[in-house]
Amino acid sequence: MIDPKNYTYRITWSPEDEEFVGLCAEFPSLSCLDENQVDALKGISELVADVVSDMEAKGETPPEPIANGEYSGKFQVRATPQLHRQLVIEAAEQNVSLNRHINTKLARA
């Protein structure tokens, strides 16, 4: 049984709706609008809990919460040769390793 509290929630402002939007990364098709940030979070949390409960009642397996995953800190990224070269040059100009340079760029993104 999955605890819906372990899912990844986010609240953002929607200029189109002029309300806050509650989102859940593990359920990208779900959202909840509200004028209040706290209520948007409460709304999406309750919606996800209902969906998880329905899925489990039907014998379906809800998505695993991102927070429950184990992460090594390693992943491979493919880039064009031109981008690879550009990143190597930038790292050399800053006198840091390519790994450190890319980590810094990712942290700023």
Image (cartoon, helix red, strand yellow):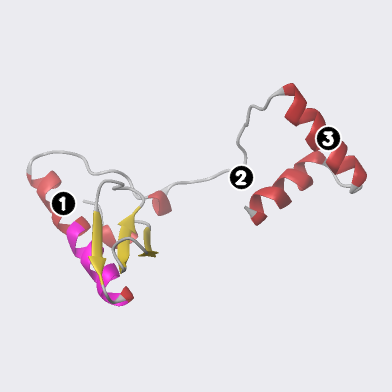
Taking the spot 61% from the left edge, 45% from the top edge, the residue there is 73
Instruction: Residue 58: give x, y in percent of width and height.
Output: 7, 41
Residue at the far front in the pictured view: 16
Residue 28's disc is none
User: Residue flagged by tag 1: what amino acid is it?
Assistant: Val
Q: Which label was assigned to residue 73?
A: 2
Using the numbered discs, state the Cα–Cα distance from disc 2 to disc 3 in whole angstroms.
Answer: 21 Å
Q: Secondary structure at mark 2?
A: loop
Q: Amino acid at mark 3?
A: Val
Foreground label between 2 and 3: 3
**Residue 59, relative to residue 81: is it above or below?**
below
Q: Which residue is mark 1?
A: 51
Q: Which mark, residue 88?
A: 3
Residue 109 screen position, x and y as percent: 62, 52
Q: Residues within 10 Å of mark 2 (few under 14, many from 20)?
A: few
Drawn side of residue 73 relative to residue 1, left or right: right
Task: Looking at the image, tell me whether mark 1 or mark 2 is earlier in sequence order.
Answer: 1
Across and down, in percent, residue 3 comes to: 26, 58
Extent of the magenta region: 38-47
Q: Work out whether 11 lies above or below 48.
A: below
Question: Neighbour class for label 3 at 10 Å: few (<14), some, many (≥20)?
Answer: some
